[in-house]
Amino acid sequence: MTEAHYHLVVNHFPIIGTILGLGILIAGILSKNTVLKNVAYVLFVIAAVFAAVSMATGEGAEEVVEDMPGIGKQIIHEHEEMAEKLALVLYVLGVVSLLGLYTNFKKHSKAQLVSFLALLVAVVAVFLAQQVGTSGGEIRHTEIRKEYKATNSETGTEEEED
C-alpha cells in the first residue's frame, strides 16, 4: 500500500468522528447525560488521533497524485492548508475533551463549562471538516469542483453547473 492508500483509509475518521461526536455532545448537554458527553469526548480524542495520522500520510499521498492529469498542485495545496487548520482545531478539541473527561470523572464544578467549550470548538471543527472533506474530494472527483463543465451528450455543447 502507498501513502495515498493509507491517507484514504484514515482521512474520513476525523471528519465523521467529529460530526458524530458533535451530535452526541449536543444530546448529552440537552439531556444532562454525563455518559453521552463522555462518549462524545472519546470520539473527539479519537478524531484528533486520526487527524494526526491523516496529516502524517497526506504528504505521501500528495507525492502520488500531484502530477496526475487534471489534478494540479494548487488544488492539493488548498486542501492541505484547510487540513492543517482542521488538524489544529481537532488537537485543541482533543485536549478540551480530555479535560472534559477528567472533570466529569472528578465531578468537578467546571464540567459543564468544559462541555460548552467543547461544543464551541466542535462546531468550528465540523465547519472546517466539511471544507476539508469537500476540497479533498475535489482532488480526484472533478465532477464536484465548482468549475466543472458538463458536456451535453446530445448537442455536444458545454454547460456550466453551479
Image (tube, grey):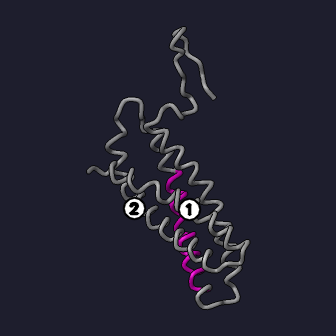
Which numbered tag is attached to residue 53? Answer: 2
Provide residue 45's location: percent of width, then percent of height.
50, 71
Q: Residues within 10 Å of mark 1 (few under 14, many from 20)?
A: many
**What amino acid does circle 2 point to?**
Val
Q: Which residues are magenta?
A: 82-103
The C terminus, quarter of image: top right
Q: Secondary structure at mark 1?
A: helix
Q: Quadrant of residue 119?
A: bottom right
State the predominant SS element of the stretch in magenta: helix
Which numbered tag is attached to residue 18? Answer: 1
Label 1 – label 2 distance at C-alpha: 15 Å
Query: Closer to the camera: disc 1 or disc 2?
Result: 1
Q: Secondary structure at mark 2?
A: helix
As drawn, 31 above or below 109:
above
Q: Residue at x 52, y 62 (%)?
A: 17
Query: In the drawing, does residue 55 fall left or right of residue 87?
Result: left
Provide residue 21's location: percent of width, then percent of height.
58, 65
Q: Residue at x 57, y 63 (%)?
A: 89
Q: Quadrant of residue 113?
A: bottom right
As drawn, 71 above or below 2:
above
Provide residue 155's location: percent of width, then percent of height.
54, 8
